[in-house]
Structures are given as structure tokens and as C-alpha cells.
Image (cartoon, helix red, strand yellow):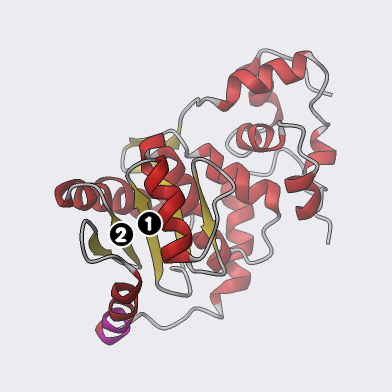
Amino acid sequence: MRYAMTATVPLGTLLASGAARAAAEAPASFTDADYAAHLAALRKKVPQEGFTIVLEKPFFVVGDEAPAMVRRRAVNTVRWAVERLKRDFFKKDPTEILDIGLFKDKASYEKHAPAIFGDTPDTPFGYYSDRHRALVMNIATGGGTLVHEIVHPFMAANFPACPAWFNEGMGSLYEQSSDRGGHIVGLTNWRLDGLQKAVRAGRVPPFKDLTSTTDDAFYHKDKGTHYAQARYLCPTGYKTLQEVLGLKFP
């Protein structure tokens, strides 16, 4: 399926339209018994030594840093992001209890992602696996990837037909974020420099092409600009985006 959207439709409007379609299918809240059963199954997969498991509904945060640090990330990053994303965009929680694997370094990430979650990472930072109901990452690369990946299960629950460019654009928007009056705000991040260079080199497609791309094309025909272009499209609109970049788009 192909999707199209004008660059001036507000982010909240597009999210609201998807949430309205999903609202009738809202699942019942998870019970204490649901969480207990999930925890019991999780403990069978997670090594007993060196790992801490923290419940931060609707997630279980699993990490091999110091226990105090795992708990701090659960509150200061996971809870912080979830509260603000739900406040502004998402009415529904993910439809399943999910795990967040936070591995302390590259070696731990590459060892434990396959052992615990059944995936061989294809990115050095982290990823969201719908199949394994998990957000998995090398937390040594920073907390921005964690916030990015938290967006995806909420998108899946609230906007099931969300095209990849919007899903990844919104995730990328909050890779570096801050609080403004209790609301999450996306900040300029590392993607901007590469996008500016790509624009100057004429390698950035028109917005019409980006927003009508298939999911497969978005992920597999990306010349290094799709995520960044989508990120700077999501919060602004065409005119403001040009002002941010100081460049003229096709």
C-alpha cells in the first residue's frame, strides 16, 4: 500500500486520525496476574547473575548495568518519555506487555540480544522487535535510541496503518528531546548535518516521493536521507523545515 500526505498536515492531526480508527479495539488493562506471568517467563530467559528487572508499566526493563542505574533509566527515560508521549499523542497503551533490554556495552548487546530475545542485531544502536515484543539496545550509545524505539509500539497500538516514513520520522524526532511545560519536545539532533549535506548534493527526494513511498522502499532504498528527512518533516511543515535547514528543497 502507498501513502500520501501533504507536508502541512499537523503531526497531532495525523496521529488523531489513526487513534480514532484504533479506539474501538482498545484492549483491557493488564492485571497484576498478567504482569506476574510475564515476569516468570522473562526470568527463565534472563541470566540470574548481573541482571536487574524493573517493572515500568507496560514494560519490563531488563539491564546489566548497576541495579541503581537500571532503575534510574526505567524512571528517568522510560517513564519520562511514556508519560509525555501519551499526554500529547497516544490514548492506547501497547497491546502486549513488552520488554526493554538495556545492555551495558557492545559486547553485552551482541551476546544477550540473541540469547534473551532471539535476534541478531543489524544495527549498533538498538531496535524494536514486534515479533519478540521487545525493545533491545546498546545503552552505551545513549538514551536517544531508547526514546526512539518507545515510539514504535505506541504507534502500532494507536495508528496500525502508519507508514514507515512517519513512524521512523516521529521516532527520530525524539532521539534528542527535552521537556517544555510537561510536553516532550524534539531537539536538533545528529541527523541534521548529514541531511544538509545531502540536500546540497541533490540526493534528497521531494517530499511527495518520501510520503508516498512503500514501507519496503523506505527501509531498503534509503540513500541515507529517509530517516533524517522524515524527522525534520514531522514537527514543522514545509516552510519551517526550509527555514531550519536554510536550504531549498525540491
Secondary structure of residue under mark 1: strand
Q: Residue furthest bottom?
A: 33
Q: Earlier in the sequence, mark 2 or mark 1?
A: 2
Front one among 167 and 183:
167
Which residue matches tag 2?
A: 62
The answer to whether residue 221 is left or right of residue 69 is: right
- Image position, residue 187 (x, y; %): 46, 29
> From the viewer's perspective, is 204 left or right of 230?
right
The residue closer to the viewer here, 215 or 131, is 131
At horizontal 40% and vertical 41% (from top left) the residue drawn is 184
Quarter placement of the C terminus: top right
In the image, the segment drawn in magenta is 33-37
Query: To which quarter of the image does residue 232 belong?
Result: top right
> Amino acid type of disc 2?
Val
178 is higher (above) or lower (below) than 199: below
Residue that label 1 marks: 101
CA distance for labels 2 and 1? 5 Å
